[in-house]
Amino acid sequence: MPPTPLTAAAVARLRSASVHPHGHLPKVGPRLLRLFVTEKYAYRNDTDGYVLDGQAALEDLNRADDSRPFIITAAGRRAALNKAQIQALTAEVGPDGRLARGVPWPTQQTLARLLLIEFRDERREPASGDGIPFRTPLGAMVAEAKHHTTHPDDGSEPDPCRRPQRGRQPECPAAPPEAGGHLPRRDAPPRAGT
């Protein structure tokens, strides 16, 4: 399935939810909300507090009940990141969670605003605004999340495995069943045991 391109407005809404203390999505139109629920970027609890999933979540979109917020998921937080931010959060992190020295300052600041990294002093205590960047537990969860959309800033070269061109077959192997039917990113490091 080719990735759905996210608009700048969709990314802005996901980022707004990312910085909300409880992850609540701001008011969005029905089409955007349907995209977020379908792609599992947001969810809503039913009246008993259980997460609505699949068709029940889509049917709940038609209800006029605004008292229950839609909440962003780890995949939704990841979809709001561009390639450089995902790279910094996944591949440029040491075993202790420290970001590599080469991660640009603007990328660090964006990830910190989205609560995915935090700055710590030399004793590894939280430091306000300046210090050593470390990935947070939320950042680790987002790094592992799956998403199936393309960020508007990442429109340079389409990945033939994810976005086949008209009339051409993708130039990559079929996804193994253990990958959940999704093709791995070409730039992803090999998984353990492969």
Image (tube, rainbow, N blue to C red):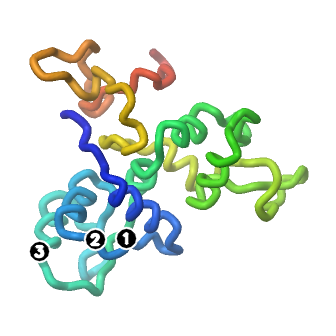
Between 156 and 49, the one lying in front of the other is 156
Q: Which residue is mark 1?
A: 25
Quarter of image, res 87: top right
| Amino acid type assigned to the residue bearing label 2 in the image | Val
Between 187 and 140, the one lying in front of the other is 187
* SS type, badge 3: loop
Q: Which residue is mark 3?
A: 62
Q: Is residue 165 visible?
A: yes
Q: Position of residue 7 (x, y in %)?
A: 31, 52
Q: In this figure, what is the number of numbered marks?
A: 3
Residue at 41% across, 61% down: 12
Q: Position of residue 73 (x, y in %)?
A: 39, 58
Is there a contact, CB below 8 Å, between mark 2 and mark 1?
Answer: yes
Q: Would you place residue 136 above or below residue 63 in this image? A: above
Q: Which residue is mark 2?
A: 28
* C-alpha separation, residue under disc 3 versus residue under disc 1: 17 Å
